[in-house]
Image: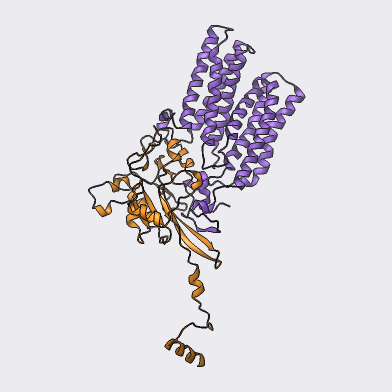
Chain colours: A purple, B orange
Amino acid sequence: MHPAPSIILFTILSGFGFGVIAWVGVLQYFLLISSLEVIAFSILGVFFAVIGLISSTFHLANKINAIKSFSQWRSSWLSREAVASIVSLLLVFINIIIIYFGKNTVSLVGIIASLFSIITVFTTSMIYAQLRSVPAWNTILTPFIFIVGALVGAAILLRPDYALYGLVVLFVIQFLFWLYRDQTEKNMKTNISTALGFTEESPIRSFDKAHTNQNYLLNEMVFKVGRKHSRRLRYLSILFSIFIPITIMVLLRFDTYVAGAIVSVIHLLGMYFSRWLFFAEASHAVSFYYDKS
Amino acid sequence: MTDLPKCEDKKLGLLIDLDICVGCHACVVSCKEWNSSGDTKQLSDVNAHQKEPVGTFLNHVHSFEKENKENNESEPFYFPKSCLHCEDAPCVTVCPTGASYKRSEDGIVLVNEEDCMGCGLCAWACPYGARELDLLSGVMKKCTLCVDRIYDHGLPEEDRVPACVKSCPTGARSFGDFNDPNSKVSKIAKERKGVDLMPEMKTKPVNKYLLPKIKSNFDKEFNTEENADLNVSGFLSWVDKALDKL
């Protein structure tokens, strides 16, 4: 699949933003952070979530109809994501107002906002996980990697002590996801024979493509560039998203937000590689019509 | 709502015979022509007359060769591919704006361009690559089964079929109702074991394909070696012997 930078940035940044919102709600409920911190980090979370949502509109070819994407929540995960993200953002605003006017109040709104922000990340992941046409994504590991990724990224900033465990969990899920991806690609149920309706498997080769040049299908779904560096990018991704953050945390044992922010940035860079591979390494069933090699 | 209809009165679709198709691309061209003119909007081309032309098409013809295990020769066949109007169409339910829908009256899957925001998720959801985003108008394009032809009473009855069916010079494409067991397409599909593409995707395509027949024994019988013994009798046998002696 084509790794569009707008979609990669959207999933990473909005994931981080909603992760921050989720943590703020929980920490606030258990009175682990001050009112000022609640307000500051809520705004930070909203900022990243909104930046992500805006960057997601960059890949729309007909932006004028974007407002209509709120209408099909009954059947479409993309529509559910739009609705859930707006609900979470509204809840955060209500929570900020409550905290601002009544300091140190236990606000249930915050924890509901947490819940909705996790639901939002879940709906984002289901946009990909629902696609039977992309077998590498069509797994429960996809929601896990999105949700855990979002929560861990935000935890590095807000609660480095929890983030340490989170990074280990993220490492395991990331490893399982790549394992699953490699196995699925190796043992695809779909092949050139099933794509053409044959039941027996005899060698079939494409000797002339259907068009003489690139087209939308090839650009979007038969992405091949960069798979060559897949291994190296996996190592880089793990290095930046997991190992460097863990090393810094264990060695420095920091508890300032500035240090947390720096480590978060390193972590998100690693997540960018991971998300790039998530797209670039997933093959779409249509590629069999183009002699997938 | 972009739910799938509970039941369809008709299941209109195409029956494509790969044994007959000669890969002439007439269906591709007539499809593009019909769907770019008249009441329909553009199927745009970018750089049409320059170095790297890119265009939107609703129908493609791929060319394949299949190895024949009996004589180790490859047999070419041509494979036209357009929307299969699946019963369980994944492209419909993923649509966030409600632009994608499947009609309950005839099962045709359509895009309402007024609602499409061009996110491309339906094209991702389709395992067959049947949908293409139009590069200029920014909305999703797909085969409509020429919905603006097949119901047009202004046209003579024999023209009320999709453009690709009408233009096929070999008759490799037939159009009809697969819900009606007595329709021509249902009967041929049953008799000649019409198949689904990628049945493992569980999309339940309406369009059916007839696979190319095996042409194996013909080559064995037709021995063109110079000194081969001709299996002939009577007058031809005499000619054979007489020529051998020359």
A3 relative to A147, above or below: below
Q: B141 left or right of A7?
A: left
**Residue at 63% in and 40% down:** A180
Quarter residue A205 falls in: bottom right
* Figure disc tally: 0
Q: Is residue A41 above or below residue A129?
A: above
Q: Quadrant of the N terminus of chain A?
A: top right
In the image, residue A190 lies at what x, y percent?
Answer: 54, 48
Q: Residue at x 56, y 42 (%)?
A: A135
Locate residue B85, reporting x and y percent.
40, 45
**Which of the two residues, B12 or B80, is positioned nearer the viewer here?**
B12
Residue situated in front as seen by the camera: B205 or B192: B192
Rendered location of residue A266, percent (x, y): 66, 30
Q: Which residue is farthest bottom? A: B246
Is residue B164 something one can see in this rendering?
A: no
Question: In the rendering, at what x and y percent does residue A255 appear?
Answer: 71, 18
Q: Residue furthest right?
A: A251
Specify the quadrant of the image occupied by residue A25: top right
Kindly identify the residue that appears in the image at 45 percent across and 39 percent down.
B90
